[in-house]
Image (spheres, rainbow, N blue to C red):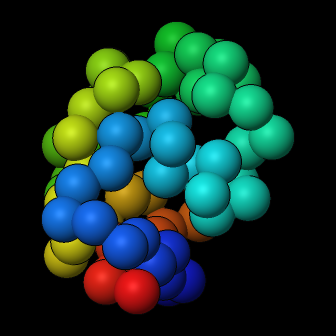
Amino acid sequence: MESIQIKTDMIQLDQLLKLGSILQSGGEIRFLLEEKRIFVNGILCEAKRKKIHVGDVVEIKGVGTYTVTRA
């Protein structure tokens, strides 16, 4: 499990994936959402702008699992 550090208490899912270099652009998240491959804290996520907080775990099936930590 890798960690992605953020400087704030919260970040949007699409911004987090760009910050972590998982996606090159925020628009790419649409495909992962349509394929139902993104889970936040074990729950299927269907919103690209879902608020992600420090301590949350984001799993992308076939890509990896990421813990959000404070920078």
Towards the viewer: 71 or 3: 71
Vertical side of 42 occupied by 13: above or below: above
Q: Locate residue 13: give its quadrant.
A: top left
Q: How many marks?
A: 0
Q: Locate residue 39: give its quadrant.
A: top left
Mark yes or no: residue 67 visible: no
Q: Locate residue 20: give its quadrant.
A: bottom right
Vertical side of 44 occupied by 16: above or below: below
- Residue 68 point in image, percent of width and height: 35, 73
The residue that appears at 49% across and 75% down in the rendered structure is 4
- Left or right: residue 63 compared with residue 66: right
The residue that appears at 33% across and 82% down in the rendered structure is 69
Q: Quadrant of the C terminus?
A: bottom left
The residue that appears at 70% across and 54% down in the rendered structure is 22
- Residue 63 point in image, percent of width and height: 67, 56
Vertical side of 63 occupied by 23: above or below: above
Vertical side of 2 occupied by 42: above or below: above
The residue that appears at 19% across and 65% down in the rendered structure is 9
In the displayed image of the protein, which residue is found farthest to the front? 7
In the displayed image of the protein, which residue is found farthest to the right? 24
- Residue 25 point in image, percent of width and height: 74, 31
- Residue 7 point in image, percent of width and height: 37, 73
Mark yes or no: residue 26 visible: yes
